Image (spheres, helix red, strand yellow):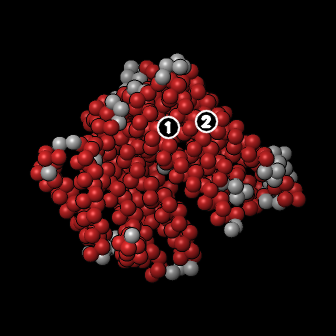
Amino acid sequence: MGIIARQTIKGSIANYIGIVIGFATTFFVLTDCLSPSEIGLTRILVDAAMLFSSLAMLGTSSSIIRFYPYFKDERHRDHGFFGWACLLPMVGYLIFVLLFLLFKQGIINLYEERSPLFVRYFYYLLPLTFFALYTSVFEAGANVLMRIAIPKFVREVGIRLCNLVTYLLYGHGIISFDWFVLLFCSSYALAAIVNFIYLVSLCKISFRLDFKFLTPQLIKQIFSYTLLVTVVALTSNVQLFNSLFLGAQGGLALAGIYTIAFYIANVVSVPARSLMAISGPVISQSIKENNLKDLSQLVKNVSLHQLIAGSFIYFFILINLDALYSVIPHGAEYASGIGVVLILGINNIFGQTCSPINSVLSYSRLYAYSLPLSLLMSATAIILNIKLIPILGINGAATASLGATVIYYTSMLLIVGRKLHIQPFSWHHARLLAIIVLLFGLNVLWSWFITPTIGNVMWDAVIKTILLGAMALMMTYHTNVSKDLNRLIDKYIPLFCKN
C-alpha cells in the first residue's frame, strides 16, 4: 500500500473519530456544562480567530502546496522553503496585530452592550489567532511532505479531546471560568506546538532562508498568487460572519443557541466532504482532457448523490428534532434554534448539490470568476446579516447564509452553463425531491394520527424513523432515482435476507 493510500486511510479514521467526539461533546457535554452565553463566547472566540488567521495567513497554506515543487531539492534542503513559509505568516500576523490595536475600541464598542463577556476576554484573540495561524501553516507543511495523518489527528481529535476535558473540568466546578477560557485557548497552542514538533521530526526541512534562490519572476508569481488567495480566503468564510454579527447585535446567548443548531444542521454536509474529495480529481482530469460530455454526466451524477445523501439526512433530522432537543441537556433553552436547523439544512443541501459546479469553475479556464463571485457572496452575507438579525434574530443569521449561498451558486450556475454548457440538474433530481415532499407529507399525517397513540417521544421517533426510512428506500429504489444506489441495494439486501 502506497504512502498516499496509507495517509488517506489514517486521515479518514481521524476525521470520523473526530465527528463522533464532536457529536457527543456538542450535544451532551457542552450543553450540560456551559450556559448559552458561555457557548456563544467560545464560538465567537474561535470564529474570530479563524477569520483573523485567514487574513494573517496571506495565502500561505495554499502557497505552500502551490510552490513547494519549485523549491523541492533534498540536496539543498528545499532552499529554506519552510523558513519562508513561517516568515510570511509572521509578517501577516504583525500587520493583523497593528490593525487589531488600531481598531480595538471600535470592536469593543460593538460588543460591550450585548456581549460584555466577550469584551472581558477580548485580548485572548491575539494568542488564539497566532496559534490557529501556525497550526494551519505546519499542517500544510506536513501535507506537502505526504504526512497528513498526524496533523489531521491533532485537528480533528486532539483539539476536541482537550476541549472536552476543559468543559468537564469547568462543568464540575474544578476550575474557574477564567481558567476555563485560558485552557480552551491553550488547546490551540498545544496543537500548533505538536504540529511543529512533528514537522521538525520528519528531518526533511530547513528554516534557513536561501535568498539567492528567489528570482524576481518567482517572487512575482508568489506575490500575485498570495494576493488572490488572501482575498478569496477572506470572502469564503461566510459562515464565520454569522456568530460574530449575532454576538454584536443579539448577544452571546443567541450565538450559543445558534451554535448548537449550526452543529445539528452541519450533519447534513458530512457525506459531501468525502464525495467531493473523491470526485474533485476526476472532474479536474475530465477538464484537462476537454471531455465535456463525460464531465457533464459526472457533474450530474455527483450532484444527484450529494442531494440524495443530504436530503435524506435532513429529512430524518427534521422529523426527530423534538426528540433530539428533548435529550439534549437543557434542551428547552436551545429549542428556539429549530428554525436555524431548518434554514441551514436547506442552505447546506443547496450548496452541496451545486458544489460540483464549483469544482468545474475552479479547475477550468473560468477560474478567474472565483474572486468576484466570492466577493459577491461575502458582501451579500454581510448586508443580510446587518439587515435581518435585528428583525429575525438567529433565524436572520441563518437566512443571511442561505441568501448568500443561493446568490453565489445561482451566479455560478449561469456562468458555467453559458460558457461550458454544463449544469448539475436532471429529472432524477426532480424525482428525488418529489419523494422527499411525499415523505414530509407522510410525517405530517403520522404526527396527526399515530404520534398521539404512542405518547413517548423517543419511541415515536424510533418507530417513525424505521418505517419512513424503509419507505424512503423502497420509493427511491422503485422510481430508479439512482442506478448506482440500486446496484448497491441489489448487492447487499440479499445478504441481509439470507441471514
Sort mark 1 into few (<14), some (14-19) or many (20+) by Cα contacts within 10 Å: many
Q: Quadrant of residue 350?
A: bottom left
Instruction: State if disc 1 and disc 2 touch (CB < 8 Å).
Output: no
From the top left corner, tell me how far across and down residue 108 is, in percent.
Answer: 47, 23
- What is the distance, in whole Å, between disc 2 and disc 1 at their CAs? 13 Å
Q: Which of 5 and 376 is in front in this view?
A: 5
Q: Which amino acid does label 2 sit on?
A: Tyr
Report the disc number at residue 47: 1
234 vs 452, left or right, is right
From the top left corner, tell me how far across and down residue 375 is, in percent.
Answer: 46, 50
User: Which residue matches tag 2?
Assistant: 188
Residue 223, placed above or below residue 116: below
Residue 496, placed above or below residue 328: below
Q: Which amino acid does label 1 sit on?
A: Asp
Q: Residue at x 75, y 42 (%)?
A: 197
72 vs 253, left or right, is right
Q: Which residue is drawn at 73% across and 57% down?
A: 145
Is label 1 in a helix, a strand or a loop? helix
Q: Residue at x 54, y 39 (%)?
A: 160
> In the rendered image, is residue 105 in sight?
no
Report the disc number at residue 183: none
